[in-house]
Image (tube, rainbow, N blue to C red):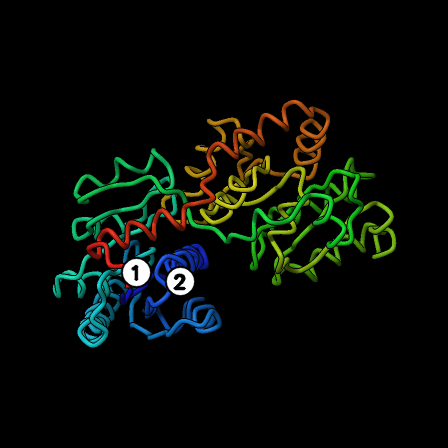
Amino acid sequence: MRVLLTGGGTGGHVYPALAVASELRRLVPAVEFLYAGTREGLEARIVPASGLTFRSIRARGFIGKRPLDAARALLELARGYRTALALVRAFRPHVVLGTGGYVMVPVVLAAARCRVPVVLHEQNALPGVANRWLSRYAAAVAVPFEEARAAFPRAGRVVVTGNPTRPELLEAGTAAARRELGLDPDRPVVLITSGSRGARSINRAAVEWIAAGPVPAQVLLSTGHGYHAEVVRGLSAAGLDARALAERGVTVVPYIDRMDLALAAATLAVTRAGALTIAELTVRGVPAILVPSPNVTHDHQRRNAEVLQRAGAAVLLPDAELSGDRLGRLVSELLADGARLEAMARAARSLGRPDAGRRVARLLLEAAGGRDR
């Protein structure tokens, strides 16, 4: 069985595809994969490192661009389509999985022309433009929440699968994870993170809160590579060097490679509301304060956060209202209410889909005609 994967630009599009590939390989050990992405996107580094064959396709977003930039982007997509058509004809996939981003537009169009079945996976509660437009060519569309189903009236089939996550998310116990991260296994942990890039507003609020006085829990603050030096300077200006931070139970790092351990250790998380983050929080059952990024297309992070807020799994804190004082009061309020935290954790787990990767993999098998080899 040959499967062509496509999607990219951000980890939120790439990691779900890799998670599905891992599950499909368990179901069909002899499966062959080819991944089509952009040379500039995160996929160009991540996919080869995962052991899959990678081919680059030219593609660029055009929605919301100035007329001249949009025209250039459309020309780039046309060139990408020719490359994608040659790729599909050479690889002869039995099915194509698209996980979002403009790079999948030429690939899905090429697959449709060659009559190759297509399955799309949407990660957000508010579906992206590319997935909505391409759904007319899809045998099936996998969505994370019931709320996203209505966005795909033209799809052959819409299935709520959840977002695929890494299987190791559920492996570590809380106490063991805290010990491995150098934390006290018996004290609660507040995880503050905003991804590899970081977010200035979250980091600034965290610094203000930590600098204001003793905190009611251990704090694991992942600043993002771009803000680590700025955060360290801010804490130092408040008289908090490495020793003082350690005495308060505060750990500051630029990035957390083992997010599975961080989530297992966390009593409460403060984070953005990207699709992959939401999936990991719900699979692990971590209560959260969600601060949606105001700088994303169509405000989709807010829609993701609202799904968890309605379920009682998270508190939505708008970026414009974020401050050290507001964050500190909210964290203290939640940590002081064990019953509420437990109810939030149960609500989060009710939304989590630890088998999402396998669900999407089975959709691929069905679209490919039930091939098992």
Question: What is the C-alpha distance between the residues marked 2 and 1?
Answer: 8 Å
Question: Residue at position x 62%, y 57% from top?
Answer: 258
- Image point (45%, 49%), residue name: 295
* Element type at mark 1: loop
Query: Is 223 drawn above or below residue 293 in the view shown?
Result: below
Task: Kindly indicate whether the residue at mark 1 contacts the one at mark 2 (C-beta within 8 angstroms).
Answer: yes
Q: Quadrant of residue 206?
A: top right
Place of residue 212 in the rendered image (x, y in percent of width and height, measured from the top left) = 79, 40
Out of 4 and 219, give the one closest to the viewer: 4
Q: Position of residue 363 (x, y in %)?
A: 28, 49
Mark 2 is on which residue type? Gly
* Residue located beneath label 1 in the image: 102
- Across and down, in percent, residue 327 comes to 66, 36
Q: Which residue is mark 2?
A: 9
Residue 225's place in the image compared with 275, above or below, is below
The secondary structure type at the circle numbered 2 is loop
- Graded by Cα atoms within 10 Å as few (under 14), some (14 to 19) or many (20 or more), the crowding at tag 1 reads many
